[in-house]
Amino acid sequence: MKSTSTNFNTHLFTGEAAGQIINYRVLKMQDSIFIYIGKKDEEVLNGLAVGLLQPYNEKEAISTCILENKESQDLAQKLTVRLKKPTFISCNLNVDRLIAPIIEKHLIKEINEKPEFF
């Protein structure tokens, strides 16, 4: 039997926001990425959104919810523009205006420091 290489890479990192430890699980695929965000000891899949680049403008993205979650949709749109690829986001936290920027900061820092995982 012939073996083949996979186009999937995984990465896990953690961050802290509002006294909670947050897991960030990244699944890098050939032409897209999936990022799961959730409490360390409560990993559930409650929200899912996808962001796609506009066909004629890579500086803008559209996003839609697959499983209802506004936080996932907002992050999918922002990260799609930054990563220049379809981005699936599952943000499974109660996100308020104070926590949202911290989550985004964790992601941007990791993307900048370890781009090979994104």
Image (spheres, helix red, strand yellow):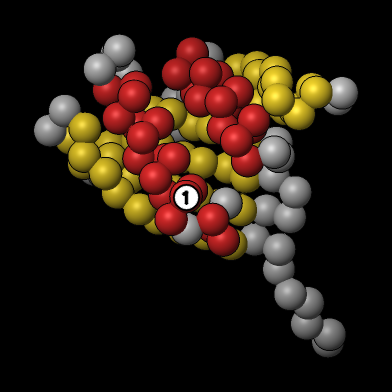
Q: x%, y% of residue 116?
A: 56, 61
Q: x%, y% of residue 103?
A: 35, 32
Quadrant of the image occupied by residue 62: top right
Residue of label 1: 112
Return the residue nearer the eye: 43 or 59: 59
The amino acid at mark 1 is Asn
Quadrant of the image occupied by residue 60: top right
In this rendering, position of residue 61 left or right of residue 107: right
Q: x%, y% of residue 31?
A: 75, 49
Q: Secondary structure at mark 1?
A: helix
Tell which residue pokes out farthest to the right in this image: 56
* Residue drawn where x is 54% and y is 56% of the image: 115
* Residue drawn where x is 35% and y is 53% of the image: 13
Return the residue nearer the eye: 56 or 25: 56
Residue count near mark 1 (Cα–Cα under 10 Å), binned few <14, some 14–19, many ≥20: few
Q: Where does the N terminus fall, quadrant-wise?
A: bottom right
In this rendering, position of residue 60 left or right of residue 113: right
Q: x%, y% of residue 114?
A: 47, 58
Tell which residue pokes out farthest to the left in this image: 19
